[in-house]
Image: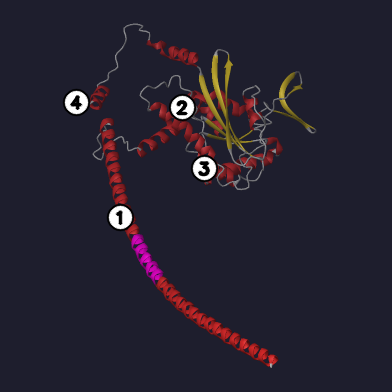
């Protein structure tokens, strides 16, 4: 009998029996609480919004502290994600808080791909957790979970409508992270404009199919407050770390020439609502939604890409060993196929190269024969020319010899005539 059949049978045969006395497993919730408190908790927040909307100030205000960080400039060539982790302690509960900010978001002229670094960062955290899960020796109890639990999307207080960059980015992120839209620096617009702006934002999100995080209403203890707060989304917030004396109390506020805006006054802004919903009421639900919904979706898609499925075509459970062997055989088959293709391609290229070399060799031989024949013709011409020149030289020498001979004969005849005349002159003198 298969293990799944045994488990199904055990589930069907489960009965409820009364206890005769106290056993003690009612202390399990206390044990779980004590263990969780000793291990501590982690919470990761992603702040998405244009530079200058007060993301860092709001984080300082939310957690009532001063986080270290350099102010961002508007000169970034692209969107960069800056992650900072802090250890916080409240009473006896420890919290490892990670704040990820999008530096340079919305500062470029071409904003078409501004969302891509954010999506890649979120997927990278999912992939790191998945790789840790797939290890043979897992240490998930000590693993630092860097998956994003909440995305605070800061909307500029324009009072008109959402920018196309905001709609595109939230649409790309809604299946990967819990998005909580907030209107930053809401004291920049009037209350009537703010009310219309909230309605406009909600309408545009619905019409474009953007799924934002809804506070859960299935738990009776928080159903009423969460249902009420869902109607207040997006929250209009103000952040400030400056404390001013209002009445007899020191309160976080912003001082303006026309008056004072109190951060924790619900008549002035929704900061208290955001803090209640994000930290005090729904922090654990945000963590659970990240694991059970967004991470499971990523995990399922990745495993399906790897060839793993829950059931086979006959609706029978898949065996991990059989799936592994099938994928291994499929991979080996593809490897052999590629190897054979590469071998045939190599043989084909060798044949083509041999044909090219033979053709080149033939061309070289033909060129050599042509040059050899040309050389022979040139050599014959030169020999004929040399013979002709030699004949001319010999004829010239013969003519020169004949001329010299005639000249010497002429010289001898002239000398004998001169002697004869001299002799005749002498004879005349003697007479």
Magenta span: 359-376
The mark nearer the N terminus, 1 or 4, is: 4
Q: Which residue is mark 4?
A: 1
Q: Residue furthest front?
A: 431
Residue 278 in picture, x, y percent from top left: 56, 27
> Mostly what secondary structure, the magenta segment?
helix
Residue at mark 1 to residue at mark 2: CA–CA distance: 63 Å
Q: Which residue is mark 1?
A: 351
Residue at mark 4 to residue at mark 2: CA–CA distance: 35 Å
Mark 1 vs mark 4, foreground winner is: 1
In the rendered image, the vertical position of residue 383 relative to residue 49, given as above or below: below
Does residue 28 appear left or right of residue 279 in this picture? left
Residue occupying image coordinates x 51% and y 29% = 149
Q: Which residue is mark 3?
A: 171
Q: Mark 2, residues whose alpha carbon is within 10 Å: few (<14), some, or many (≥20)? A: some
Q: Residue furthest top?
A: 21
Residue at mark 1 to residue at mark 4: CA–CA distance: 60 Å
Circles 4 and 2, Cβ within 8 Å, touching? The answer is no
């Amino acid at each position: 009998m298969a293990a799944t059949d045994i488990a199904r049978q055990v589930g069907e045969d489960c009965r409820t029996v009364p206890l005769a006395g106290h056993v003690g497993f009612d202390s399990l919730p206390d044990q779980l609480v004590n263990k969780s408190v000793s291990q501590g908790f982690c919470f990761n927040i992603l702040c998405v919004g244009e530079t200058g909307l007060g993301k860092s100030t709001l984080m300082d205000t939310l957690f009532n502290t001063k986080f270290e960080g350099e102010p961002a400039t508007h000169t970034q060539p692209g969107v960069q994600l800056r992650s900072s982790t802090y250890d916080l302690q409240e009473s006896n509960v420890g919290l490892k808080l990670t704040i990820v900010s999008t530096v340079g978001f919305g500062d470029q002229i071409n904003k078409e791909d501004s969302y891509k670094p954010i999506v890649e960062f979120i997927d990278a955290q999912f992939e790191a957790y998945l790789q840790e899960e797939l290890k043979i020796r897992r240490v998930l109890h000590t693993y630092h979970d860097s998956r994003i639990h909440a995305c605070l999307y800061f909307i500029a207080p324009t009072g008109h409508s959402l920018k196309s960059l905001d709609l595109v980015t939230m649409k790309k992120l809604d299946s990967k992270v819990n998005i909580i839209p907030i209107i930053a620096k809401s004291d920049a617009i009037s209350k009537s404009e703010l009310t219309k702006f909230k309605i406009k934002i909600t309408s545009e999100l619905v019409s474009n199919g953007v799924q934002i995080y809804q506070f859960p209403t299935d738990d009776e203890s928080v159903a009423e407050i969460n249902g009420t707060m869902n109607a207040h989304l997006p929250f209009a917030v103000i952040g400030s770390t400056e404390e001013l004396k209002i009445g007899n109390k020191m309160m976080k506020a912003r001082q303006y020439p026309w008056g004072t805006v109190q951060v924790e006054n619900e008549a002035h802004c929704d900061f208290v609502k955001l803090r209640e919903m994000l930290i005090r009421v729904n922090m654990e639900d945000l963590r659970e939604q990240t694991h059970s919904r967004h991470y499971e979706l990523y995990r399922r898609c990745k495993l399906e890409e790897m060839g793993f499925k829950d059931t086979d075509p006959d609706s029978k459970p898949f065996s991990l060993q059989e799936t592994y062997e099938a994928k291994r055989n499929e991979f080996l088959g593809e490897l052999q196929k590629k190897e054979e293709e590469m071998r045939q391609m190599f043989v084909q290229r060798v044949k083509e190269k041999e044909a090219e070399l033979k053709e080149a060799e033939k061309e070289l031989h033909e060129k050599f024969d042509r040059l050899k024949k040309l050389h022979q013709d040139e050599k014959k011409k030169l020999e004929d020319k040399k013979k002709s020149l030699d004949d001319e030289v010999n004829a010239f020498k013969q003519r020169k010899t004949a001329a010299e001979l005639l000249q010497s004969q002429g010289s001898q005849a002239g000398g004998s005539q001169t002697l004869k005349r001299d002799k005749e002159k002498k004879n005349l003198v003697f007479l």
